[in-house]
Image: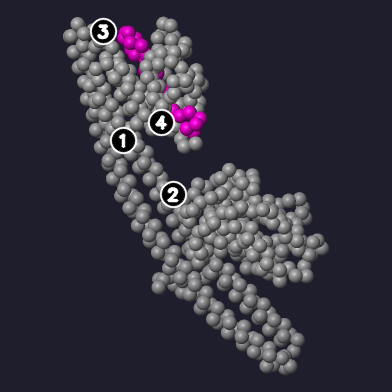
């Protein structure tokens, strides 16, 4: 049983529910950010481990060919790209010579070419880097990481160029290359160049033992420094991961408490509506009883008073029903499934036959898609918009309503068009608020909750609803977006996009 005081008004209940929802949304957003950060840190740690493993194995290689094969395997596993080519560049002749490749066919890759290699360039992503386009043309890749190792000026070893990426035929299952890979790729290419240089020096300078020992000592120091950096980075990552886990646990506890509070609030709203309807039925019943028993004794004014009671009882009863629907929109008894909107609109039109009988109302429905969602929510959404179009028609003009949809990127944009009395554009930000009415109850019946319910349903799909006024006295277009396809009922996890232009 809820601990909320029983004297809260429906408006206060709604405001409390909105506050709880905003807290849940902030908690979920923070939770997603923490997960994304943790994944990025884990990926970076994994790359460091693989780079360290490459360093260890590279020290044990005995020839440049063996080192190239080792490097090809290390590039492929570290950066998860299906194609890798390693070239050697002659700075005198500008000739680029292929040392080894992985993932290419012999026909699809150039073995030798005259190419100008950018100086002082460490790593970049093509096609963003225009200076690297000439290198990418050798491999025919759609998108590529390019690392260039320039040896120190006093060294005689040639520069190395490493190109990793994916071709057009790989693009359907590859994502765009992440900028975060650049530092690791630059380090990998630099380390490959260092080890290649070491092997070449060992082959050329076998008789110069002292110089070789000094060079080996330098490499060992570089290795120790790199290992120390890896250890420090690993420790930092582990500490960060522990903090993230703690924050995630706290967020999960908050989400659980908010979910329980929402459940209590829905139960409270249901009980409160039942308690409100009981005396309301009594008022209506006794008013009808008075009208039947004493109809001959009541004058015309008394009958008007009774009719006023009946009208307000019905209005209050509808208001309670709409408030209950608004508070329980997320827990309507239905499951997420594929919904044929053509059939759903056909059912709605069948239900409206009695309402529009004798009225000049023409409702046209274009071919609509099938989407995933709760059929009950979608029915309330379309029914409310069509009911409004009928209610706010112009009395001297035949009412024309058209329902249509078109796909915009990964979402459907739905449009409900009417030729009614229209809405001023200045009400764009207020018309969807609870109890916001543009006309009095005497002019147009209603509770002021219909469009608020529509907005809440659309938001559960992580969509957006708005209206577009047409020419004066030409009516209004109500538009809303819904994802093209999702089997996940937790729509709050979907990416929010603005498709105002559809």
Residue beneath disc 2: 29
SS for callout 4:
loop
Is any atom of residue 383 visible in this view?
A: yes
Residue beneath disc 1: 45
Q: Residue at x 38, y 31 (%)?
A: 79
Q: Position of residue 374 (x, y in %)?
A: 53, 60
Is any atom of residue 428 visible in this view?
A: no
Residue beneath disc 3: 204
In primary-sequence order, the first of circles 3 and 4 is 4
SS for callout 1:
helix
- Of circles 3 and 1, which is in front? 3
In primary-sequence order, the first of circles 2 and 1 is 2
Q: For the residues labelled 4 and 1, say whether their Cβ atoms are less than 8 Å apart.
A: no
SS for callout 2:
helix
Residue 233 in the image: above or below residue 99 = below
Picture quadrant of residue 421: bottom right
Q: Position of residue 467 (x, y in %)?
A: 66, 53
Residue 149 within the magenta-colored segment of the rendering: yes
In this rendered view, identify the residue nearer to me: 18 or 120.
Answer: 120
Residue beneath disc 4: 81
- Of circles 2 and 1, which is in front? 1
């Amino acid at each position: 049983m809820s601990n909320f005081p029983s004297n809260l008004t429906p408006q206060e209940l709604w405001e409390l529910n909105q506050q709880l929802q905003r807290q849940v949304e902030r908690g979920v957003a923070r939770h997603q950010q923490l997960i994304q950060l943790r994944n990025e840190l884990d990926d970076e740690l994994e790359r460091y481990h693989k780079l360290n493993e490459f360093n260890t194995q590279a020290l044990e290689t005995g020839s440049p060919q063996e080192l190239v094969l080792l490097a090809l395997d290390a590039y492929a596993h570290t950066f998860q790209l299906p194609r890798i080519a390693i070239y050697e560049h002659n700075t005198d002749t500008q000739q680029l010579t292929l040392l080894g490749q992985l993932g290419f066919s012999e026909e699809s890759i150039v073995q030798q070419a005259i190419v100008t290699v950018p100086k002082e360039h460490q790593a970049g992503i093509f096609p963003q880097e225009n200076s690297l386009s000439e290198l990418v043309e050798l491999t025919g890749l759609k998108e590529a990481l390019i690392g260039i190792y320039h040896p120190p000026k006093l060294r005689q070893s040639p520069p190395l160029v490493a190109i990793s990426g994916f071709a057009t035929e790989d693009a359907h299952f590859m994502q765009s290359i992440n900028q975060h890979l650049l530092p690791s790729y630059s380090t990998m290419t630099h380390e490959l160049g260092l080890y290649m240089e070491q092997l070449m020096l060992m082959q050329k300078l076998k008789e110069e033992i002292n110089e070789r020992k000094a060079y080996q000592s330098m490499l060992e120091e570089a290795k120790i420094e790199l290992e120390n950096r890896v250890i420090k980075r690993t420790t930092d990552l582990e500490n960060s991961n522990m903090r993230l886990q703690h924050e995630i646990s706290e967020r999960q506890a908050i989400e659980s408490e908010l979910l329980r509070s929402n459940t209590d609030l829905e139960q409270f709203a249901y009980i409160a509506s039942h308690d409100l309807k009981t005396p309301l039925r009594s008022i209506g019943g006794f008013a009808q009883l008075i009208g039947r028993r004493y109809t001959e004794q009541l004058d015309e004014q008394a009958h008007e008073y009774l009719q006023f009671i009946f009208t307000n009882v019905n209005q209050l009863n509808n208001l309670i029903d709409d408030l209950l629907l608004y508070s329980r929109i997320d827990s309507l008894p239905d499951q997420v499934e594929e919904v044929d909107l053509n059939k759903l609109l056909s059912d709605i039109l069948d239900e409206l036959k009695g309402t529009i009988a004798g009225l000049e109302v023409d409702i046209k429905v274009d071919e609509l898609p099938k989407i995933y969602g709760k059929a009950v929510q979608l029915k309330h959404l379309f029914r409310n918009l069509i009911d409004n179009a009928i209610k706010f028609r112009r009395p001297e003009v035949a009412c024309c309503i058209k329902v249509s949809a078109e796909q915009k990127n990964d979402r459907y944009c739905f449009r409900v068009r009417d030729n009614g009395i229209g809405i001023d554009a200045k009400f764009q930000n207020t018309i969807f608020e609870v109890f916001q009415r543009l006309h009095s109850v005497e002019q147009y019946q209603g509770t002021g909750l219909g469009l608020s319910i529509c907005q809440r349903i659309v938001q559960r799909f992580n969509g957006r609803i708005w209206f577009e006024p047409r020419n004066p006295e030409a009516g209004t277009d109500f538009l809303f977006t819904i994802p093209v396809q999702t089997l996940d009922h937790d729509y709050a996890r979907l990416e929010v996009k603005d498709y105002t232009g559809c």
